[in-house]
Image (cartoon, rainbow, N blue to C red):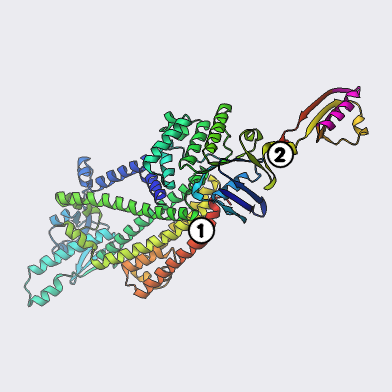
Amino acid sequence: MKHLIIFSLKRRFLNPISLFLQVLFILGVLILFNLDHLSSALHLDLTTPFPIQVSYETQEYLLPTEIWEKQGIKLTEASSAISIDYNEGIFEVKGAASISIQAKIYGLLLKSHQQRLLNQSHPSIADFVMVYNSVPVVFDSMIDPMTGLRENLVFMILTSVYFMMLNFISVNSNEIIQEKSSNVLEFILTSVSPFQHFCAKILTGLITVLVQIGLSGGIFGLIMMARLNADQGQGLFALANKYFALDSSGITYETLLGLFKFDGSLIIKALFAVIFLVLGLLIIQVLILILSARVKTIEEAGSIQGPFYLGLLGLYYLSLVLNTPSQLIKGLGVILSYVPISSMLLMGMRILSTNVAHDELILSLFISLFTLVIIMWVGFAWYRKGLVNE
Amino acid sequence: MLKVKHISKSYHRKKALSECTFDLEPYQIMGIFGHNGCGKSTLFRIIMGILQADEGEIIVDHKSLGYMPEQRSLLIDLSLRKQASFMAHLKGIHENDLENRLLDLSTSFNLKELIDKPLKTLSKGNQQKAQLILSILHEPKILILDEPFNGLDYHSQKDLSHWIRNYAQKGNAVLISSHQLEHMNGLCDEILILDHGITMTQGHLKTIRESHQMYSVKVNADSNWKDLDQSYESLNAIDALIEYRFKSIQEAKKALNTFIKDKSTQSLHLEMVDLSELIHP
């Protein structure tokens, strides 16, 4: 079985197309982390400041316009999609600001607020500290920008892994169909039992995903570290200021990590989320393996993966809809976090966005594990018959 | 060495193999003969453990088996060396042993120059040889060859027959299937004839030939004498050409004399009926 796994992995990773795609990925990440250099080399106008309407009276409560412009925002009295007003000690931000712009505005308003407080006298240190770290801001959407950003980032990472895994499920399925159609399976089954073949395929699928995540994550991390170590990625952050929610003034690698709050508890939560993701995908993988083994013609093969992709795409969109803390603590969000397959995304999201009780976690984990074992047990008989077209 | 005891197998209630029983001993070459769909491949796949029999028992050490399936079972984008390396690992052959064996076998089958070429660039005959090499890499004591002569030209067929005989002479046993009886002739010590999964007969080819001997007399005549003589049973009658079959040469000659006396007889032909025709009329 070991050699079957090694052989499959070699064929998957050490083929010209895979190597070419890896090179493309490295190029893509290199471009991403050097986008500022590229934009200046190509004379792209990516640094035009974003206009925000601010009255002359309100500007008195804000940092100088030069500082705002450094962050990619131009304060103007002319009409704009977004406006800032200062009324009775509260900043009101009106207009359809994206979450990234909101985050940037929030950071600059906080600094304006802190700068103003430093220039004032205070009756006591305690009063000063109390008001120093918070600025009264009202956004149209009432979203706390930092929280929203963090949720979105976590969701992005989770769904990236989700789609990466989905891609490799089809690889397994195609491999079985190829082995069957080329009759190589007849040869292989003279050396390994159908059960070993079944387990080898599942393990190969899992190892493939882990290797790919490791490779992609490693390449991404290495290039990111190289750029940050070179110049703290200042140019990149300045560029990102305009389009993303990164308040880059004095930002360093450490502060960037601080934004994600990668503390011990988040890492444990992320690990649990990954476990649910892996369990869900193992269940799907076993189902696709069983169906692939039953395929007798190439035409049939094409019809297997389609419905799975549609279903999993549906699950992705559903999770997009439910991706708010309020929807993940009651109703459909909670129910689906117990259901095998849907729990791979929704329980992960619940763990990362809300507080999930330990017994809830264990119950959902047990349901997924139990389902996996049952599907493997019952499915193997079908798989065996399918392999040899019995 | 290999004992097949009362093996039966059905696919969706259709009997593919029924009560098949035989033994295979060292130095023996046994042929399984039957037309397409008679159950030969099913029998082999059951012996190899790829399929499970509904009834019966196979007594064999599975590690001693080597199997060449009827259809091409190759990863054609790989070279023979690479695919052999993969198969060798699955079979637990050491890398050094593999190199020596591969060299010997590729030399024996005239594939030494093509060993590093992708299998898809090889001719069908050479692909068949490559497949045979892959099935004997681990030096099996019992070699099972499913329709090994398919796709081979006359000379390659002769070479393969010669190689099979040599392989058996080393103390190995060979189980071989074919739907053409001439391939078994002079090669197999014993044959087993399958028809729709049922064992029709089993034994030495010469004995089977003798016991199933039959003679054909074909006569081309205008007269209606055939209606007058009811003791002969005609097999085919196309216009004036009629074929009669007889179990002994004496009977055939007697009929021949009768036909010769008829003035309307235009032609007469006497021949021994091929065994395969008798099994599948």
- The residue that appears at 13% across and 61% down in the rendered structure is A63
> In the rendered image, which residue does mark 1 sit on?
A380
Left or right, B149 with respect to B87, comes to right
* Residue A263 highlighted magenta (yes or no): no
Residue numbers of the magenta segment: B249-266
Q: How dense is the environment of label 1, judged by Cα within 10 Å: few (below 14), some, or many (20 and up)?
A: some
Q: From the top left corner, tell me how far across and down residue B42 is, in percent.
A: 60, 47
Question: Which element carries disc 2, helix, strand or loop?
Answer: helix
Q: Position of residue B136 (x, y in %)?
A: 48, 40
Q: CA distance from mark 2 to mark 1?
A: 44 Å
Q: Can you tell which quarter of the image residue A74 is in? A: bottom left
* Residue A146 lies in quadrant: bottom left
Secondary structure state at the residue bearing disc 1 = helix
Residue B149: image location, x then y, percent: 58, 34
Q: Label 1 sits on what residue type?
A: Phe
Q: Amino acid at mark 2?
A: Ile
Q: Can residue A377 be seen in this snapshot?
A: yes
Q: Is residue A261 left or right of residue B124?
A: left
Judged left or right of residue A316, residue A51 is left
Mark 2 = which residue?
B208
Q: Which sits in the foreground, A105 or B231? A: B231
Say which quadrant the C terminus of chain B sits in. top right
Q: Would you place residue A288 above or below residue B227 in this image?
A: below
The residue that appears at 46% across and 54% down in the rendered structure is A196
Q: Chain of mark 2?
A: B
